[in-house]
Image (cartoon, rainbow, N blue to C red):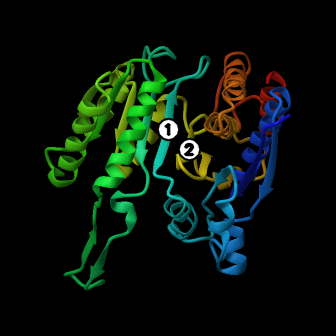
Amino acid sequence: MNRNYNIAVIPGDGTGPEVVKESIKVLKAAAGRHNFGINFYEYDFGGERYMRTGETLPEGAIDELKKFDAILLGAIGHPDVKPGILEKGILLRLRFELDQYINLRPVKLYPGVKTPLKDKGPEHIDYVVIRENTGDVYTGSGGVTMKGTPHEVAIQNMIYNRMQVDRCLKYAFEYTRKRNRKKTLALCGKTNVLTYVFDLWERAFHEMGNTLYPDIKREYYHVDATCMWMVKNPEWFDVIVTTNMFGDIITDLGAITQGGMGIAAGGNINPEGVSMFEPIGGSAPKYTGKNVINPLAAIASGAMMLEHLGEENAANAIENAIIYVTTNKIKDLSAGKMGYSTTEVGDMVAEKV
């Protein structure tokens, strides 16, 4: 054994610890089967810690996390903590300060999984959304004046610079080339209304494509049209690149078409630094401790992490095991309706790996 990885684990809130436990179970099975080492180091960042100490991320946490090969996250969000505190103080801070400038979201319907899209199957729903992850309205630029009066003004600015756009597009072009499916990259935007920001994105998109990636076909879709086509003709898509806000919205739509939040995995990527992988669903506090939540999204996030680390055979083995389970075992991915407990689903995937 000559490959060894150190992984920071943030189980987080609600059902996060339950799904992370199953993801780790499967990752250990994959490591043993494919001859590499993997060590897990747990951090208690989340709602319980915040209520106990008043801090979201303690001093030095970011520098400590930079030393790891990757981060595995369960979920952030606590019913007793005001919305925005944990999300900004943990999730956004990690993404921004670790410069995880790519949010990678595969939208893939596995065999055996039901989709609400009529007459669509796994052969129709298999594309990837690349969401820029550190700019846009999420930077918090703006403010409020005359709050609480009839003349209150609230401003939140959509901000991008050329460097942010270029590095996101470069990743997207390279990913499309490596994926080597339809070799088509689509820019999703709103050039007819958000004329300043998307003039920048569109010019950069075509300049880079013409100069460096002539082998990649380029397309452009308005975001509203993208939402329609994701429902009507998902088979059109290969790779979509878009801004932070639009990516946040369309990836949730994509998740529903692939079977729901219980199967949707994601990665926050810094190609030159530490990346973080997570199921895109929330903490689902009403299911906490009941052992009924679907862990497949967290398990698939672990597979994404292994692929990112270069362990592609192990990642493929996990995905194949997930496909086996969705095809032969689970008929409903909803919490409490799987026919198996959270632990049993993790056991089935680990055994198949």
Q: How far apart are the two marked residues, 2 and 1, measured between alpha carbons?
A: 7 Å
User: Between residues 297 and 66, which one lies in front from this camera angle?
Assistant: 66
Q: Residue at x 32, y 49 (%)?
A: 165
- Count the marks: how many? 2
| Res 35 → quadrant | top right
Q: Residue at x 70, y 42 (%)?
A: 293
Q: Which residue is mark 2?
A: 267
Q: Is residue 322 above or below residue 31?
A: above
Quarter of the picture holding the N terminus: top right
User: Between residues 199 and 349, which one lies in front from this camera angle?
Assistant: 199
Q: Which residue is mark 1?
A: 105
Q: Is residue 215 above or below residue 98?
A: above
Inspect this view and state whether residue 229 appears: yes
Mark 2: amino acid = Gly
Q: Residues within 10 Å of mark 2 (few under 14, many from 20)?
A: many
Residue 197: give x, y in percent of width and height.
22, 53
| Res 49 → quadrant | bottom right
Asked if marks 2 and 1 touch (Cβ < 8 Å), the reply is yes
Quarter of the picture holding the C terminus: top right
Residue 168: give x, y in percent of width and height.
39, 45
Q: Is residue 158 above or below residue 117?
A: below
Mark 1: amino acid = Arg
Inspect this view and state whether residue 125 appears: no
Q: Residue at x 30, y 31 (%)?
A: 228
Q: Residues within 10 Å of mark 1 (few under 14, many from 20)?
A: many
Element at label 1? strand
Sequence-first disc among 2 and 1: 1
Residue 254: give x, y in percent of width and height.
45, 34
